[in-house]
Amino acid sequence: MTGVLAHESPELSAVEVRARAENLEGIAASGSEGVVSSQRLATVPILRPGEALEMVPGLIVTQHAGDGKANQYFLRGFNLDHGTDFATYVGGVPVNMPTHAHGQGYTDLNFLIPELVDRISFRKGPYFAEEGDFSSAGAAHIDYFRGLDASLAQLTLGQNGYARSLLAGSPEVGGGQLLYGLELFHNDGPWEVEEHYRKLNGVLRYSRGSRNNGFSLTGMAYQGQWTSTDQIAQRTIDSGQLGRFGTLDPTTGGETHRYSLSGEWAKRWASAQSKANVWWLKSGLDLWSNFQYCASNGCPPGDQFKQAERRQAGGFAASHAMFERWGGFEVENSIGLQGRIDHLNPVGLYWTSGRQTQSTVREDKVTQRSLSLWAQNETRWTDWFRSVHGLRADAYDFSVDSSLAANSGKASDQMLTPKLALIFGPWKRTELYLNYGHGFHSNDARGTTIKVDPSDGVTPVQSVKPLVRTKGYEFGVRSEIVSGWQSTLSLWQLDSASELLFVGDAGTTEPSRPSRRYGVEWTNLYVLADWLAIDADLAWSHARFRDHDPLAGDYIPGAVSTTANIGLTLDHLGPWFGALRLRYFGPRPLIEDNSVRSGASALTNLRLGYKIAPRTQVAIDVYNLFDRKVNDIEYWYDSQLAGEGAAVYDRHIHPAEPRTFRLTLSHRF
């Protein structure tokens, strides 16, 4: 955490944490960074594990296919696809996958166990020197507990074959704590073709000391497989050919695995703070999809395709901060080094039918390396003014060995990105922030060496720059206007040299345009009493391409303009507790000229719980409380059904799940 006055937060009661956990007065470098505590997260009814990130203000988490696939993310006018431009870490291990078979920056959080999350630290904008690739829109660092107050046994049962069991604890071993968690999961969902999503998931962490003065060793393992009901053409529903929860290809779906080992170390000296972590990751994915049905290959065999990869990756990060006094000024000087290497063998795209491979579009071996050095100075000039200056240097190297020789090759790129924050205050529990910074995202390595379209091996294709620069500005206010009411307001702008280019579903690239986004976010947490808290996150953004094109249009498809996440939390009402949450996901343009737009959705989730005994409780969660018939996602593209003579442009939708009940019994021992 940035700040010369940063210290480890004390353990607080649940209500005190709700009141104070996000109070970063005197510590934060922007109005759009914060911390979500485990106590706040525990009150949220979560349909899917990735929805834990919806506690990051303005972030929307949804799904357009089977639940075993990475979520779809939206923030600050970005359709982040499966994670691009939002960097995510769990236990110090990066989750975003560069040069992924399905999408650049693919962020699959299905291995996350929300009950074990200690905190989520988030930052938005390219203003932080230690944040690198994929972090232009924001970053979230999710950390598991080092120890639990008591062991936990939990069982959840619900409609449509939903069953989840969790066993977790943290016994003392050898002077430290051994955190363990084991999750078993199954769900069929509301789909006409049962999803049959099952996963086996576990975490094992040994730690001593604290986050700032201690060490931890963590192992995580996850396996999942599922049948997927992908988005379907609206015309099939309108004609009665399919129901809202039907599918045109009952064999789509996926299998995935993820294994990781990591170590974190921190040492607090008299006038310095040192931190380091190292990690190793092995993962794989086989994903079968069919979005256009019969448009390319006719029916049979249809347009099903498989995206697959096998990856090993490793990396490290080390930093050292020195707390000094220069000429009477309090100063914190920090320096850090980060590195990462990913080796994919293979990463491929294949035409399939009924999950049987028919032909190979492209298959590659890819090695991607990066090395980053950053430095930062924070100076407290007066009691009411401090500044943070940073500079980051990144170097990337790509090597691609393709099944089509013309698309093999090497590429490299380097980038310097400056950062600046000016912080004024606090005055009467109020701080002002001015931020400026450059960031970047990397492009898919295959896009940096591509020469010809892999579908025909002849058509020339323009390669892309390895690194794409972004530039951001922000004005923020953080204040506790009334005792117990914390509020932040941020006005921001972010320019990107180009939108992402590599299209994993086709194995090729498409034209890109520079963009500009700006907007406002207003985040509130108000603890009215020890039994009642209200939070409200409201966001508005404006997203356009910067190179005006009167023929194509300047709207950015999928760029949501308005979101809201509003919650009411009740506790300490005798044995009763509960929460009510409303999430609003505004309309989006689906095409550049804005002639086709998605609908909006408003979903309400309810939790009502009863403490049977001091260590035993039961809770019922109701998702989509009012049974709204809305869509999780909408797209506009061409597809061809069996019997149609040509492809037809149409709206393609993935419906939100109907009203769903789940009952959870928890016991601590």
Image (cartoon, rainbow, N blue to C red):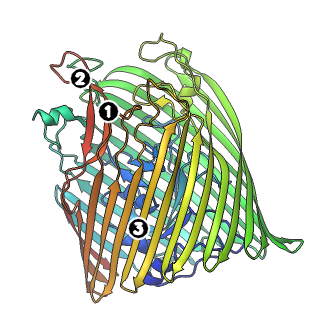
Q: Amino acid at mark 2?
A: Gln
Find the distance from the CA under tag 2 to the CA under tag 3. Answer: 43 Å
Reading the image, the residue beneath label 2 is 640
Percent position of residue 142, x then y:
50, 61
Residue 589 lies, with reference to residue 390, above or below; the image says above
> Which is nearer the N-term, disc 2 or disc 3?
3
**Furthest residue in direction right, as rendered:** 327
Q: Residue furthest top?
A: 458
Residue closest to the eye, 110 or 38: 38
Point out residue 171 in the picture as x, y percentages from the top left corner. 46, 77
On screen, residue 656 versus residue 237, left or right, reads right
Q: Which residue is mark 1?
A: 636
- Element on which disc 3 rests: strand
Q: Secondary structure at mark 2?
A: loop
* Amino acid type, label 1: Trp
Q: Which residue is mark 3?
A: 536
Q: How far across and down, in percent of the image, does residue 166 sit?
A: 32, 66
Q: For the N terminus, which image quadrant?
A: bottom right
Q: Are marks 2 and 3 in contact (CB under 8 Å)?
A: no
Residue 565 appears in which quarter of the rendering? bottom left
Residue at the farthest bottom position: 574
Which residue lies at the image location 18% right of the left edge and 46% below the top edge? 191
Element carrying mark 1? strand
Q: Is residue 300 left or right of residue 149?
A: left
Q: Quadrant of the C terminus?
A: bottom left
Q: Is residue 228 visible?
A: no
